[in-house]
Amino acid sequence: MRSNKDSEKTTESTAPRNPRYAKLLKITKRLILMTLCGLLVIAVLFGVTLIAGKKFMVSWACFGCGLIGGFVSIQQRLKKISDEELELLSRSWFQILLIPIYGGVFALVLYLAFLGNIVEGALFPRFYVPEFSIPPSSEDMKKLFTSTYPAAGADFAKLIFWSFLAGFSERLVPQIISKTGSNKDK
């Protein structure tokens, strides 16, 4: 006589599997794995620069938050994407990783827009940026990337928020760039 567990296994194995659900599960597992790996890499780079160089690298924080925003975005959209896109994502690690990497890059571009005062206002972070000598030197560039920090704690929080949002909303930074370009022409 068969036990309940054996009959449950038989029922589960003979039941038709939903291929869309299987692909969603596969992609979700990959997203979780990639998010953890991405965070680990960022944490290691962050730790090395903090311990060895005694510097908090704001750009790494921006990239990491953009990366996380990209992962959250793709996870949020999974149930709504077409079967063709789902098939592509389930077959390719690269396709899954591409959206979060764009998120990290967009977060860095937005960070540069903040530093250059291209995007400014009460909702956006302000920064302490070291002065350049005249003429600028290589040392000035080094200081720009190692000694530029948000002006206050609230500015750091705004930067982290906007970096996440740049990764989450893949249209945000391209729209800012487009508007900046069209404002320049006027």
Image (cartoon, grey):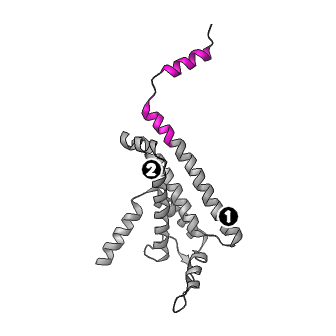
Q: Name the element at disc 1.
A: helix
Q: Earlier in the sequence, mark 1 or mark 2?
A: 1
| Residue type pointed to by label 1 | Gly
Q: Which residue occupies the foreground of this view, 181 or 136?
A: 136
In this rendered view, identify the residue nearer to me: 156 or 108. 108
Q: Main secondary structure of the magenta part?
A: helix
Give the extent of the magenta segment.
1-27
Give the image location of residue 128, x and y in percent: 57, 79
| Amino acid type, label 2 | Gln
**Mark on residue 95?**
2
Image: 155 above or below 34? below
Q: Quadrant of the N terminus?
A: top right
Answer whether residue 154 is visible to the viewer in this image: no
Provide the residue designation for mark 1: 47
**Residue 183 screen position, x and y as percent:** 32, 75
Would you place residue 69 above or below residue 141 in this image? above
Image position, residue 143 (x, y; %): 59, 80
Q: Secondary structure at mark 2?
A: helix
Residue at point 43%, 75% (across, down): 118
- Viewer can see residue 172: yes
Displayed quadrant of residue 81: top left
